Image (tube, coloured by chain):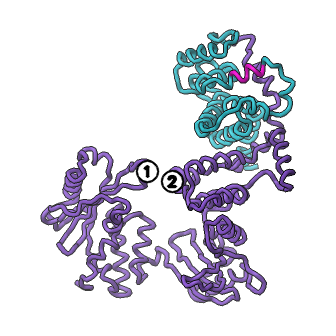
Chain colours: A purple, B cyan
Amino acid sequence: MMENNRVKQALNNTLSSLYVNDAEASALLAQAKGGKKVKKKLSVALVLTMILMLLTIGAVAAVILSNKQFVDQIVAPMAKDNASNTWTGDEVVEIIRLAEKNGIMISDEIQNRINNHEGRSKIELMRSFVSAELGPYIATWSIEDQAWFDELLVRSGLSEQQTRFTPSNGEISEAVALDKAKKHIESAYKCMIDNSTSTAYIVHTEYRQFVKGNGDIEPRRWYFHFEPNDSSLDSFDVVVSSQGEIIEAKRVVGVKNIGDVASVEAIFDYYDSEYGMHYEWSQKVWESFQADLQRSVDKHGLQTNFTAFALKQKYGVSQTSTINQHEAVNAAFRATAETSGINEEELRKQYKSNALLLVGKEGLIWKVSLVNTNPGKHRSFDLRHAEVNATSGEVKNVMHYEPGKNSIYDAYYLIEVLTDVSDWPTKG
Amino acid sequence: MSYAVAAETVKEQRFMQWVKAYSDAILRTCFVYLSNVQDAEDAMQDTFLKAWKAMDTFEERNGASEKTWLIKIAINVCHDYHRSKWFRKVDLEKALEDLPARYLSVEDTDVTLTMDVMRLPEKLKQVVLLYYYQELTLREVADVLGVVPSTIHRRLRQAEERLKRDLTGGEDDGK
């Protein structure tokens, strides 16, 4: 290396005041172990500027902002600047710049929201920043933080009415309300949720006062949701009045007992949340779904047409039709290519196919869904659909979901698909 | 002391050695790269955060040193920061004014050269920082930036021409 490294010499001389002292070095270790950045140290010039600003406005406050403070003091006033419920692109850029300037880390969740354009909602972006500090679910924040956020939305013109509060004089405390809710679960459902097993359940707590559509204000109530960490366990919802009476309680049966449930929709919802959209279920999942439906029927009787219908549905290669799943998917691709004008080969590269064999009024029908795996920057999803008569091979209802023009659910959501058979006989 | 606790202690000690040895240079590199004190401090913090998370997977292989590894992380962090801040108008004089007061006693020629480096296009600034300031070899610079050494050599020549300074030893890789 050269003897006379002018660059190194010049940079070190010029930047000699820029160094990491022992305290900051220790802070680096602490933050690394904690997994998040600490607030930045402030340069002399910046500190002087801030002190001058603070003196000017007569305020004495901390200059290092937490996420909550950032939202409260910087983002919320920006939100109030105009009546829109969404941010402009420039506003989002400015918020990110200010966040970084204040030492606030842009979490993956916030980044994803912005990338997916979800962050354009003023409320959602504000909540994302707060969630990075307080946790993802507002009902697991302290009730003080919930009340603050709700009040902030009202103050920012993003909400008309505050609905989350802290108890006033004469209203029972959170601890008392929680105790009453747990005791009710114990007596009504024979399930213990005591403090020693608190890790088994995440308790979502809200103290809310809703306004009815006619303007009437409902009394304040405690809303508890006991979410099991183990999804096989039951979950519970309990509503307690401000004076301690149990207003309402509900048990949502866990998977271990799902087949004992009378509500077919509850069974469907469970599978939907566990395994995704029905057209993505494997044959094993589909058969398990049907087995749980059958258990429900055996125990509670056949209560809906949907159950009868769903129990009849076959999966995968049809044993009875002349068109198997592979042929049905091919037919759907061909028809979609003809209709859309897109080259079939290109379609096959871009779209993933799923098919479900349903028993419709016209006999066995393959419902084929084509899902674009890379819908592009400005679309959250891109779906196409076709129905193939499993007996004749005729292709019908070739459609492309277009926001605002048709409903995605018409074609793809099983319960909606099955509404067209509501007049089917319950038995047989 | 359990094995896990002992391992954690060793990890912390090693991390602190890295911080002591390289944090100043990384902080200054980030400052020259980003032309902003706050961004530089953030980038330096991010660099060590990422280094901590990846420490367990770090192995000295093929002669790659921990310094090179850390500098590579820092350059990538700065590159991301730089990319996300393209819209910001950079005021170099303001950036230097934001430095703590010791800057006032620095020779004008040093300040001028520092500002000249800060004004360089990103790709040229990278090679100057890595080769001259961090004193990495051409091969190490090439590894950090993911390009072949001849490209680094060419960029160094371009940077030297731009700086219009008498940099000695620019083609010499023998450190």
Name which quarter of the figure residue B85 lies in.
top right
Query: Does the CB distance between marks 1 and 2 fall below 8 Å?
Result: yes
Residue A251 in percent (x, y) is at 53, 82
Q: Residue at x 73, y 15 (%)?
A: A5
Magenta span contains residue B112: yes
Q: Is residue A109 above or below residue A198?
A: above
- According to the picture, the residue beneath numbered tag 2 turns out to be A117
Name which quarter of the figure residue A211 lies in.
bottom right
- The amino acid marked with disc number 2 is His
- The amino acid marked with disc number 1 is His
Q: Is residue B68 above or below residue A298?
A: above
Q: Residue at x 65, y 69 (%)?
A: A154
- According to the picture, the residue beneath numbered tag 1 turns out to be A378
Can residue A72 be seen from the camera position used here?
A: yes
- Choose the circle earlier in sequence order: 1 or 2: 2
Magenta span contains residue B161: no
Q: Are marks 1 and 2 on the same chain?
A: yes
Left/right of residue A423 with respect to residue A394 in the rendered view: right
Quarter that holds the C terminus of chain B: top right
Q: Residue at x 39, y 48 (%)?
A: A374
Q: Nearer the viewer, residue A21 or A68?
A: A68
Q: Measure the C-alpha gap from mark 1 to mark 2.
A: 8 Å
Can residue A132 be seen from the camera position used here?
A: no
